[in-house]
Every structure is written in structure tokens, then in C-alpha cells.
Image: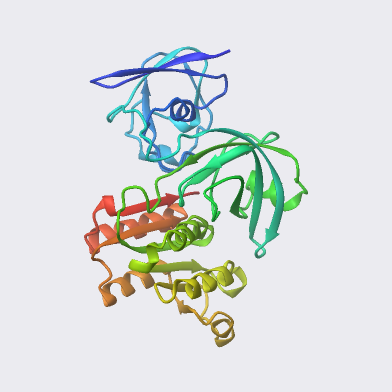
Amino acid sequence: MNMRVCFKTKRNTEEISIGQDENILFAGLKAGLALPHECASGTCGTCQGQPLTEDSLIDNWKHAPGKKHMPKDTNRILMCQSSCSQDTNIRLFGPLKKQTDEYPRPNYFDAVMTSSTRENDDVISFKLKLDRNFTFIAGQFIMLRPDELSGWRAYSICNTKLSSDEIELVLKKIPNGGFSNWLFKYSNFEKPLKAFGPLGKASLKPKSGDTDIIAIAGGSGIAGIISVLEDALKTNHLKSFKANIFFGLRDKETSFFLERLNDLVLQSKNSLQVTVGYSECTPKDNIKKLFPCISFKAGWIHEIALNEIRSKNLLEGTTFFIAGPPVMVDKTEEKLKEELNIKPENIRIDRFG
């Protein structure tokens, strides 16, 4: 049974239909509204709203980390973690607009996993077959939910082909993580998944224009960055502009996608530079010989990146990408804004957790 959600601001009102158990954010995005959001998974706290109809909503994650960003002593909700029990009215705290055609409109898809590759003990890359063609912009992500588990998880897409019924994703194992355990422990090929997307604006297009690229990625955050790089090569962006990628890992044993990055440097003909930072060890000569096009350093990747940016004066005409765990992303974003005076509109963020 469908219900009604009426979004309200001081200036306008929009009404949509929502299904039973459907989260409010997804329903609004599917209907073409440009609702505020970033991670879509309860972490960032961006998709806040305020219910105006008493006892009309269901809180699907009472301890969502994003709630720490909400003002205290208010009845605000995270729309990505709320569904309806009856018709409801919700106040928004920013402008209420329709989506433009700059980004593909998100929708629901049925999917199955067709293959997987163990990149290391904690990381798997896997491919999904969707029930129809899926179009996205390099750098965007998709939400997944197995039929047998509750809750949606966000995964960056690392395809080179931007319109296909097959997508490639990367997953990092999380202790006690329901979906990662489901994927790591069991053979789940051909088991049904629900998908929703594409989402996210951590992309070079459509508004970045002609700029150099600096990307700072931690762990599986590299997935969306690889999609951006491969698209930049394919569209000849790197014939005129340069890219500097900083990829943070713990050590050699947790490394992955190094061969792929090394090949991208070769393809770029020196327009792309990749630096890998190991936070828990000093890189050995043997890893440097295996991937001669990559620079290896010891330390936290955001500190390595900031030192390089300062020393090489890489600020002018640059779009910055930050992708990875929330703590790493927050710290890097803060440093870029406060120490290097980077404007928020020049920073693209892919924050997950």
C-alpha cells in the first residue's frame, strides 16, 4: 500500500508517493526531487528533515552515526533511515528543487552477483548483473541490499563502461558487518540483491570543467577514483590536464589495485602520478620494483598528500576528490579548507562507513 509524503519549505511544497518499508530519501530521489544527501547510508547526517505529522514515521536505525550531526532536543530525522507508517508531512531546511539532467535519476534495480575476486584478505572486487541498463557518471556509487538482510550499503562503482547492465564494485571486510560477512563467507552467486542508484556527486563532470585532478583515497575508496581516472583517459581529459592520486593502505599485505594503477600511469604518458602511502610500515624495494610507475611512501595518506600539494604548488585550477572512511575524509577535508584555503565547491567527497 502506497502512502503520501509532502515535503515543505518556506517557499514551496512537493508531494510524492512512497511504498511500504521504502525509505523517504530513496522515494524522493526516485520521484525526481533533489533532496539533500551525501552517503545515503546513515553516516554523514546530510539528509535531515523534520516530521510535522505525529507518529507517522519509523526509525530504521536508531543509533545511526549521522544523528550526531543533528541539533540536540529536536525531532529531526535522517530521511535515509526513515520510512512511513502513514501519510506524513516533512519540513526541509534548504531549498526544495527538482533534479536536473546533469546526473542520471536514481531508481531501483534487481541484481545478482556473477563473479568475485579476492584482492587481499580483507578486500573483494565483484561484479553484478542488473535487470536492465544502468547509466552513471564516473565517481558515483550504488546502494545494495540482499533480500535476506536488512539495511542498504553503499559501494563505489569502478567500471570503465558508464552505461551497462553489469557493474564492478569493491568491498572491504568489516568486523561483524552483515553484508561483508554474507559476501566473504558464503557462495552467493545468483542470489537476488536489490540495488538503488546511481548516487553521489564525487565526479569530474558535469560542473568541474577543465581542471587538474587531485584525489586522496583510503582503502576501498579508490574504487570510484579509478572510475574517474579511466573516464578522464577515455575522454582525453588527461591529454590537457594532470592528475595526482594519493592512495592510503596499511601495508604491502593489504595492497590491491596496484597493477591497475601502474597501468593507468603508463597509459597517461606522464599526465598521471600515483603515490601510495603505507601507514604501518616502510615500503620495501621489492614492491617498488614490482610497480615502478608508482611512488611509495610511509605515513598517513592525508599528511603525505598535503605535503606534496604544498611543496609542488598543486592548488591552482584543481578539483579535489576525497574518498574513504569518514574519519579520514573529515580530517582531510578540514585540512584542505583550513590550511590550504580550498573552496568547498572545488572538493568532491565520497564518504562511507
Residue toward you, 324 or 133: 133
| Above or below: residue 25 compared with residue 230 | above
How many numbered badges does the structure rendering display?
0
**Camera-nearest residue between 139 and 3:** 139
Judged left or right of residue 176, residue 307 is left
Residue farthest along the left direction in this orientation: 341
Task: Give the answer, above or below, for where 110 lies relative to 19.
Answer: below
On the image, the x and y values in percent for residue 50 come to 36, 24
Q: Is residue 204 left or right of residue 157?
A: left
Q: Residue at x 53, y 43 (%)?
A: 142
Q: Is residue 132 left or right of residue 96?
A: right
Furthest-bottom residue in this view: 285
Q: Residue at x 50, y 46 (%)?
A: 141
Look at the picture and state if 349 lies above or below 81. below
Viewed as shown, does residue 51 lie left or right of 18?
left
- Extreme residue in the right direction: 187
Residue 127 drawn above or below residue 338: above
Q: Residue at x 54, y 25 (%)?
A: 22
- x, y percentage for residue 78? 43, 32
Q: Position of residue 159 (x, y in %)?
A: 55, 54
Regarding residue 277, the answer to whether it shows in the image is no
Residue at point 25%, 73% (across, down):
313
Looking at the figure, which quarter contains the N terminus? top right
**Which percent across, then down, holds residue 247?**
47, 67
Residue 52 picture quarter: top left
Residue 216 visible: yes
Instruction: Give the image's coloring scheme.
Output: rainbow
